[in-house]
Amino acid sequence: YLRMLAVAYEKTQELARDLRTVGCGDLDVEGLTESLFSNHKDEYPEYEQASLRQLYKVKMEELRAESQISDSSGTIGRTKGATVASSQQQISVTVVTEFVRWNEEAITRCNLFSSQAATLATHVKAVFTCLLDQVSQYIADGLERARDGLTEAANLRERFVLGTSVSRRVAAAAASAVIT
């Protein structure tokens, strides 16, 4: 919707400029163009933020699905610890770069729909706030997953170390029994 709105707005502005060049008499072509899009421009910031939130939600669902697919395949012969470690989705610069690209496109539309500097600043701030929220949430979730993975790995290691130390004691006792 936002991309189509931007293209329609640009093309209408071009048409208005062409009509003004040809000569329209007393007709305010630019004013008519602005009045056609005034409702859309007023609602634009909410649509842009909703779009960015929706893109983020879809991306996170996509990453979760990829993580589940990779967990279900190739786990034959792995220990439980290896399976747990593989299920932890890594934080990726590529994903954050995708968030930035979405926001760059949104900023381009902000420039298009904002005729005044104050309006532009407000729209850019709203879009940039969405980017900051997305990146911070993504990193916080990734760090939480990493912490959970480390906790699980530590629990497994502790269990393994306890099992090993008991086995060594039993082996030492058996060895000393053989010697005596």
Image: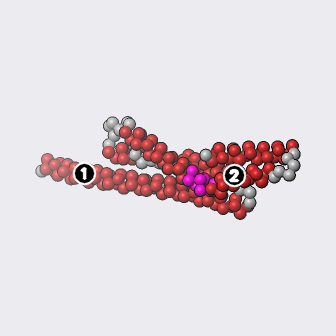
Q: Position of residue 110 (x, y in %)?
A: 68, 54
> Where are the magenta residues, as a range?
44-51
Relative to the observer, which residue lies in front, 117 or 9? 9
Instruction: Name the colouring of the figure.
Output: secondary structure
In-image side of 17 versus 133 (left or right): right
Left or right, 115 with respect to 43, comes to: right
* Mark 1 nearby-residue class (10 Å; few <14, some 14–19, many ≥20): few
Q: Which residue appears at 64% of the width and 60% of the height?
A: 125
- Does residue 57 show up? yes
Of all residues shown, which one is farthest toward the front?
26
Please check the rendered image and state whether residue 130 is part of the magenta-colored stretch, yes or no: no
Residue at position x 87%, y 49% from top?
25
Residue at 36% x, 44% y: name it. 82
Q: Quadrant of residue 129?
A: bottom right
Q: Disc number at residue 163?
A: 1
The residue that disc 2 covers is 37
**Disc 2 element:** helix
Q: Main secondary structure of the magenta part?
A: helix
Residue 87 screen position, x and y as percent: 40, 46
> At which x and y percent is residue 3?
64, 45
Amino acid at dot 2: Phe
Report x, y in % for residue 127. 61, 56
User: Dot 2, crowdedness within 10 Å: few (<14), some or many (≥20)?
Assistant: some
Give the foreground label among 2 and 1.
Answer: 2
Could you tell me the amino acid type at mark 1?
A: Gly
Residue occupying the point 43% across, 43% down: 65
Q: Secondary structure at mark 1?
A: helix
Dot placed on the residue nearer the N-terminal end, 2 or 1: 2
